[in-house]
Amino acid sequence: MEEVLKDIRFSYQPHLLKFRFDAGTSRGVLKDKTTFLISALSIQKPGMTGWGEAAPLPKLSIDDVADFEEVLSEICGKLSGSTIIGSEQAILEWAKSHISESYPSIRFAFETALLDLLHGGKKMIFDTPFYNSGQPLPINGLIWMGEKGFMLDQIDKKLAEGYSCIKMKIGAIDFGQECELLAYIRKQYSAQRVILRVDANGAFSPKEALDKLKILSEYDLHSIEQPIRQGQVKEMKSLCTTTLLPIALDEELIGIHDFKDKKKLLETIMPQYIILKPTLVGGIASSREWIALASAMEIGWWMTSALESNVGLNAIAQFTSTYDIVLPQGLGTGQLYHNNFDSPLRIERGEIKYGIGDWGI
């Protein structure tokens, strides 16, 4: 018999996350980031609280809007008092029908909070070995943009920590210096020892992109994320067809909600990979659609967090663990902040796992 979650009450609280360093991206430098924790309570489960996180990315999320908090407050008030049949599928369908696709981070937060509440408010979003027995997920070590010396220090640290996959953000400093950093890694480690990914965040122009991809391919890279900015479908299709370096779509997926539109985009561009950020693409149900389409077309994929706190990261990691994972995932962002929430999430030698510890919420 399916459980019923009656008279659910939603509320939220903002939290200003502070970076441990100036986090450079092609869209500027981040020093702090406001996120919003969503709580869900039901009279059916007294004393239990489900938690989710709405964390739109500045200058990238479609719900990075001036009145975001006002909208969130309105949604929490409007949906409080709801009753939901307590199954995973029912919760995902309820969130899709009650929260606009224009607010993907809010939809993801509600999906997560309700799934947590369904499972007893113990931060279990999905019942998998990742949560229950500490089965780890492979992740990449992220190298942030910055001066060459800063990036080199990060590379040395990640390699010393035992990562077998390194992802380097490029497009912020001189391209030649970025290639020198890639050459530095390859002099120490072959492609069989260390997987190398780069993320351009759309930094290349269509005219220069192919030449730069040819140069980058000399470093035995696994892939490049979003070499040109999103929305240039014809140019991206041409790159994916002609390049020697596999291309992963990232920002390209943002704002594509309808199943037919998702299918058309992938069939048109036919990328080698897609990258899924549930906060940006509409949450769990929407990410599942992308994965199903990509798998049917033999397009690879991996999951990436989007600078959420440990609350959102936990949900994304557990969601990822519902699939058979081979490729390293982009789930190493929990160490970015001075004031992240304490959690049992642990990173050891290039893997993330749900270990022993208490939550700080």
Image (cartoon, rainbow, N blue to C red):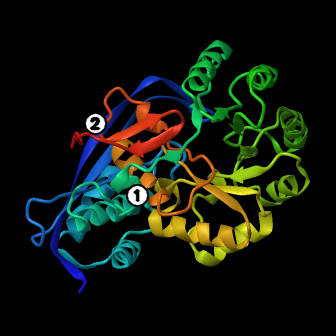
Q: Is residue 239 left or right of residue 200?
A: right
Task: Give the label on residue 61, or none.
Answer: none
Under mark 1, the amino acid is Pro
Q: Position of residue 181 (x, y in %)?
A: 74, 21
Q: Position of residue 301 (x, y in %)?
A: 64, 57
**112 versus 150 height, above or below:** below
| In this rendering, the label closer to the viewer, 2 or 1 | 1
From this viewpoint, which residue is outermost toward the bottom?
A: 1
- The residue located at (35%, 58%) in the rendering is 109
Q: Toward which corner of the image does residue 138 lie, by quadrant?
A: top right
Residue designated by label 2: 342
Q: Toward which corner of the image does residue 290 lie, by quadrant?
A: bottom right
Q: Position of residue 4 (x, y in %)?
A: 20, 80
Quarter of the figure that contains the C terminus: top left
Residue designated by label 1: 129
Q: Camera-side residue: 298 or 54?
A: 298
Under mark 2, the amino acid is Asp
Q: Secondary structure at mark 1?
A: helix
